[in-house]
Amino acid sequence: MSNASVSDPAIPSAPDRLTRFALAIGRVIPDALTTAIALMVLVFMVALLMGNSLGQTMDGYYRGLWMLLQFTMQMTLVLVLSGTLGRTPVFKRLVPRLARLPRTSTQVLGLAILVSATLSYFYWGLGMALGPVIAVYFARESEARGIRVDFPYLLAVIGAAHAVWQFGLSASAPLLMNTPGHFLESTTGIMPLRTTIFTPAAVTFVIVFLLSLFALSRMLMPRVPALISSFPDSYRLAEPLSPAAPEPMTYPAADAPTLSERIEGHSAPILVLSLALAGWLVVHFGTKGLSLDLNALNTSMLLLCLVLHRNVKNFTAALQQSVLVAWPVIVLYHVYAGVAGLIQFTTVGENFAQFFGSISNRYTFPLFTALSAALVSIFVPSSGGQWAIQGFITTKTAEAVGVTAQRGLLSLSVGDHVGNLLSPFWVAVFAGLARIDFRRFIGYNLVFAALWFGLGVLIFTVMPS
């Protein structure tokens, strides 16, 4: 997924401080795989310095390396299915129609935040896949109507609104902890979602953050906007806003569709699979009385993709394009799992838990947990991967200071997304989908990350969770 050229004509000759900060960050932070390898080496050395033998340390790495195979496939499906859903005719028609609704730049920001947050809350991959699409269509339609909206800034605002997925229906760590057989089940047991993402604290945080984001983004809106027409690659991503009616398809006698092509274009195969998936969901939620977990979420998304694409040909064509979005997690999660094994199966985890327990109490625990998560997430740009690495330490520290493991998970989610907003990893994926250099807007994320962090620590400190 390539980004726009660094020689972006829309970058001002005298960049402001946030732009200079973004460029500096881009020059010093290496890619995600390199930082994950560096973290692995660091934790390996720490394990040895803490008195673990070479054999014990290697055994910890051995036990951890492939322990997230199932989770890796689950998260791969989250990305792939979200991209496939975003390519359905329903979404291709819906986003341009929504882009025509705002009449002012304030309304553009408000509706963009609302749509992005709604998609992200229900399915984080959908918000990631469609967020750049929303920005492109909203910015293009705004410019056509004479509404001056800064395109890179709009991307940053939409990316910030995407943060609410951390406490939404596809939040990877809460769903993992609510899935039987997760890697910490012997330590924490199963965590029902009512004790994590559906707590009053989590719901309050989502609402307060979005309202604050709207107010702050409106206040900081650039006075001299960089319009989307200044970014030709991004501008061309939007289909014509008033497309001509498609011409009827005709087949010459020699090019008549074959039997296999007719089957692929028929809805019957999709109907059969959809009924099977619907039956699975009935058994999961009805017969067995289970709650939402990663498997149920992906089954629901697969069913929705099939129904909206209507035939095998459309579904597989969209699927082939969407697979390209999944490259970040396929190998990286196993590198993170190796680090998690070093922490969990040597004395590293216990020692760090004792250290954080000694400097924390029930009131400072959310702050220290969020701070440590923010630091780690810059090097581990994956919420599931980060929870695999820090989950054991967090739950043990929570036990030591007398708070619930759920409070630790929620506080860690706050810090985790600070890293997601500041690290080039996910920002580059987001920018690549919009065909713009991530350095053009990552500087704004510093302000939005500070807002997210401050509100999150405050709410998860003072409210029950």
Image (tube, helix red, strand yellow):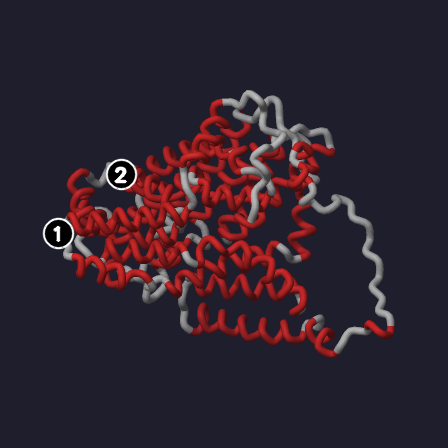
The amino acid on which the numbered mark 2 sits, given as a three-letter code, is Phe
Give residue 211's position: percent from left, percent from top.
49, 35
> Would you name the residue on which mark 1 appears?
51
Q: Quadrant of residue 416?
A: top left
Give residue 317's position: percent from left, percent from top.
64, 63
Q: Nearer the viewer, residue 323 or 110?
A: 323
Dot 1 crowding, Cα within 10 Å, few <14, some 14–19, many 20+? few
Q: Report whether 46 appears left or right of 306.
A: left
Q: Which mark is residue 117?
A: none
Give residue 301's position: percent from left, percent from top.
54, 61
Q: Residue at x 68, y 29 (%)?
A: 147
Label whose residue precedes the other's in the sequence (1 or 2): 1
**CA distance for labels 1 and 2:** 26 Å
Mark 2 falls on what kind of element?
Answer: helix
> Would you name the residue on which mark 2 appears?
368
Q: Residue at x 85, y 74 (%)?
A: 254
Establish if 441 lies above or below 356: above
Establish if 279 lies above or below 144: below
Q: Residue at x 86, y 70 (%)?
A: 252
Whether residues under marks 1 and 2 lie with C-beta atoms below 8 angstroms apart, the answer is no
Dot 2 crowding, Cα within 10 Å, few <14, some 14–19, many 20+? many
The amino acid on which the numbered mark 1 sits, given as a three-letter code, is Gly
